[in-house]
Structure formats: C-alpha cells, structure tokens
Amino acid sequence: MEQTEDQSAALEFLARRDSYDPAPETEPLHVATHGSHVFLVGDRAYKLKRAVAFPYMDYGTLERRKCFTEAELELNRRTAPDLYLGIRRLTRTEDGGLAFDGAGETIEYVLEMRRFAEETLLDRMAESGTLTPALIERTAERIRAFHDSAKSLSPNQAPGAGSAGVRTVLEENFEEFEAQPEHFPPGEVAAYARDVWSAFERVAPLLDSRVAGGQAKHCHGDLHLRNICLLDGEPTLFDGIEFNPLFACIDVLYDLAYFLSDLIIRGRADLANLAFNRYFVDGDYEGLACLPLFISTRSAVRAKIMVSAAEVQDDPSARAEMLTQSRLSFAAAAEQIAEMSPRLIGIGGFSGSGKSTLARALAARLRPAPGALHLRSDIIRKHLFGYTPTTPLPPEAYSPKISARVYALMLERAEAALKAGYPAIMDAVNDRPIDRDAMETLAVSLGVRFDGFWLDLPPEVMAKRIARRQEDASDATECVMLEQVAHGHGPLESWAEIDASGSPDSALEAVFALLPACY
C-alpha cells in the first residue's frame, strides 16, 4: 500500500471530541480499513478516504478523494438515502487549526453518515443465528427493486459485464491461485479451471446478450452480508463500490451472486434458496443459466481475499480462521460450478398437507446452487393479482379460469428453469390427473427426469395445521380442504405416496430415499 499524502492533521482533528458540535459524551471510535478511516461519534459516522493508491483503487490526491467521496454519496443514496447524510469539508482556520466547513482552504472531504448498531448488520445476525426467512426474503425484494430501478449501461460503460468483463475476473482469479500453490493446490485449481472455462464458453453469448438487453448496470458491487444493515427495521444496502467500474458496473445477477454466495458459505443454503426464489418471483429467468458461474466466481474471489486478509493478521488464531474460510470458499466454488442435470419434481397434496414446507426444504438441497426454483401456486396466484404473499385474495381469484392460468404459468416457468439448467419444483394441490400428466409430459419433452410425490395424511391433521398458520401465502381454510378431500385426487399412477403425518423432516427424508443418488 502506497501512502501518497500526509493526513495526520485530519486524523488528529477527527479523533478529538471537541472537534464536533455538540461534543460527544465519549471519545470518537476510530475504525481503519484499507481504503478509509471511519470515526464513530455519537449518532454519526464520519468517513475519510485514505490517501492511498492501489492498482484497483486510487485515492492518491485530494481531488480524487473529493471526486470519489461525491460519487460514494450519490451512488449509495440510491439504496440508503437516510444513511448517507452529506459531505463535510475539513478547512484551515486562521490560527492554522482545522474546522468543519469553514472559509479557509479545504484539506480533506469527509462523508457524514448516520450511525447504526453493529448488531443490525446482517453478517452479525448470521453469526448470532437471528437471520429470519422473512428478513432474507425482504432483502431479496430490496435487491431486486434496486436492480430494476438502476440505469442500464452501454457496453463501454460496463467493463465488468459481458463475456469480456467476466473473462477478466476469471483470469485474475487463476493468476492469483497459481501464484499461491501453498494455499490453492495445483491439481484442484486445474480441475476447477476446466469446469469454469467450460461453463464460461456455454454462457458467453448469453453474457453479451444481457449487456445488449440492458442488464449491465452500476450495481452495488460488494453485496455481501456485512454491507447490509437493518435501518428503521428495513434491510438497507450500503457501502457500494464507487471507485472501480470493473467491480461495480456489472451484470445485475453477478451483483446478486455475492449475496447468495455469502449465505451459502455461511451454511445457510436454505436462506440463499429463499432469497433466490423471491428475487425471481416474477419468473424472469432470462439470465438464469449464468448464475452458477457467477456464484462460483464470487466464492472464488472470496477465497483469494481471505488469503490476502490472513497475511496481514498479527493474531495466529485470526490468521488460521481466515485460511480456513479461504479453503471453504474455494471448495464451495468448485462444487457450485460442477455441471448438474436439471430435474422436475411435482409435489401434491390437499391444503394443510405440508407441501410448501417440504418443497422449501427440498429446493435448498438440490443443485446447482442456490437450489431449485420453487414454483408455489399460492405465490404465483398472489403475484398475478399484485398482492403480497400474505395478503388474502378475493374469492374470484380462485375461479377455474384463474386456476388454469396459474397452472399454465407454473409449467411455463418450469420449462424456462429446466432449459437454463436448474431443477424446478411444482408445488400445488395437483389433485387433477390432467395437471399431473402435464408435468410428466413436459419432463419427457425436455429429456429430464420427473418425480412426483403425493403427501398423504388424515384430514384432522391437515385441519390442525391450517388452524396454526400465520403469515402464510395460502388462503385455504378447513372447509376448502374438506371439499378437496371429498373430491379426491384420482389415480396417482407414477406418483409416490408419502406419509406426511409426522414431522417435516420425516417427510423430507422419505422423499430423499426415493430420489436417485444424483440429486
């Protein structure tokens, strides 16, 4: 790291209580990173960019620090307007001291931010076990809304997107892996390279067509759990990258991939799958085939970053932990890029049988990462009417005509997912033989495996489950369930019947016992 200018006067000023009005009750807390100095003062945080020059990040002059501080404010206000408050100037006073926003010469620019509690960071919540499915789904909605609202970039404005941008990242990864054989065994790197470049060649035309189609944008660029916090109860994306377009002017799905990769490596594949399905709730699967490469690449980048971070640790235990995280990340990257055969799974049963609980658990355990597309009829029906998943629909939304449309849309989305290489789970009552036959016909037409599972249990058990539901997408009542039971399901033929009267785990294990070993 090259320190280009002396910032000692600014740092000394920001470290003093009497520099602030009103003065805080305690001394400012100084947090240093490779690119900035942050001073936590009362309910505010003040961020000063370091006078450093890296090949990928150059804050070496005051003018560059001014430019990038302004860019950071503008870009991050897209997702966190209440967090990023403004820019303060550090100026010379007549006696040679410093002040905020005075009439004298400006010596530094400081970003003023609202301070938040460390425990509201999503990485801290992951460590404490307090991340909830609802929070992760809400975060995925926020990410999708941000991506949809961001302005599309032309090819020359998005150096990190398209086949050329992805190739650059991959080549840099392998250069660093090969330069550090003590951390990345050559045999494992070679095997990973074969899979990565094979995947890259398959999707390179799609990578370029996505740029042409407007999916290259100035994204967040560093969308891991530590850069998301709860602010006023809402997940808030912050600290997006402003300093290098190669890192931030990218495909929106490469941006999403970091969030998914971070959850997976932290052992929360279940939450990654929930986020994945909520992000794609509208069935816009056009870029889906790129996602395994994107997720694997993000995991690989994390593997090399952890090695770099370990090398500057004075604490041997911290160093060892980072090297362990590097190995886990590299192993995850290799698994995430391995080619998988897509499959279609149908799950049926009357209301209250546990279909969606089973489908959700099963989806997270299928491959490639982050698992299967969970096509739940209740969610699709709500989305068709513009309702949130837990808002009850009017009775007319359950007419035969609307139900036929929902099933047709499920088949359409399943086909798109399978063609992109992802498994799909069709989760609906599926009590009509014609609907079950349509699933099998689709699988045969695409040359993929089909497995159907019917959940069987007594009506009184289903009634108890319906009574316990809270904040669920299903609007079915006990009366609806009893009508379904009276109507029946007809011959199940190739569908396997699963005893679902016990725990969700027992039903899941029963399904896995019937799935081929290649799942």
Image: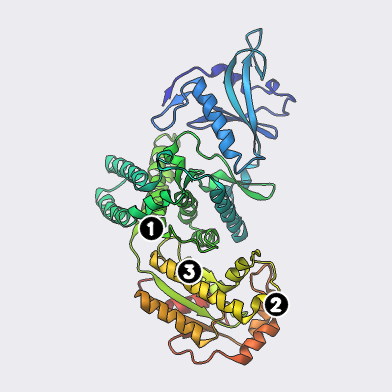
SS class, disc 1: helix
Inspect this view and state whether residue 483 appears.
Answer: yes
The residue labelled by disc 1 is 336
In the rendered structure, the answer to whether residue 467 lies left or right of residue 323 reads right
Question: In front: mark 3 or mark 1?
Answer: 3
Quadrant in which residue 107 is drawn: top right
Measured Cα–Cα span from mark 3 to mark 2: 25 Å
Image x and y of residue 304, in percent: 37, 43
Residue pictured at 61% horizontal, 39% vertical: 77
Q: Amino acid at mark 2?
A: Pro
SS class, disc 2: helix
Image x and y of residue 367, in percent: 41, 65
Looking at marks 3 and 1 on the same chain, the residue that comes earlier in the sequence is marked by 1
Residue pictured at 65% horizontal, 42% vertical: 117
Residue pictured at 40% horizontal, 43% vertical: 155
Question: In front: mark 1 or mark 2?
Answer: 2
Per the rendering, the mark at residue 261 is none
The residue labelled by disc 2 is 395
Image x and y of residue 10, in percent: 58, 19
In the rendered structure, the answer to whether residue 189 lies left or right of residue 31 reads left
Q: Amino acid at mark 1?
A: Gln
Q: Quadrant of the N terminus?
A: top left
Measured Cα–Cα span from mark 1 to mark 2: 43 Å
Q: Amino acid at mark 3?
A: Arg
Q: Are marks 3 and 1 in contact (CB under 8 Å)?
A: no
Instruction: Give the crowd class for mark 2: few <14, some 14-19, many >=20 residues within 10 Å.
Output: few
Residue pictured at 34% horizontal, 48% vertical: 163
The residue labelled by disc 3 is 413
Q: Is residue 419 above or below residue 149?
A: below
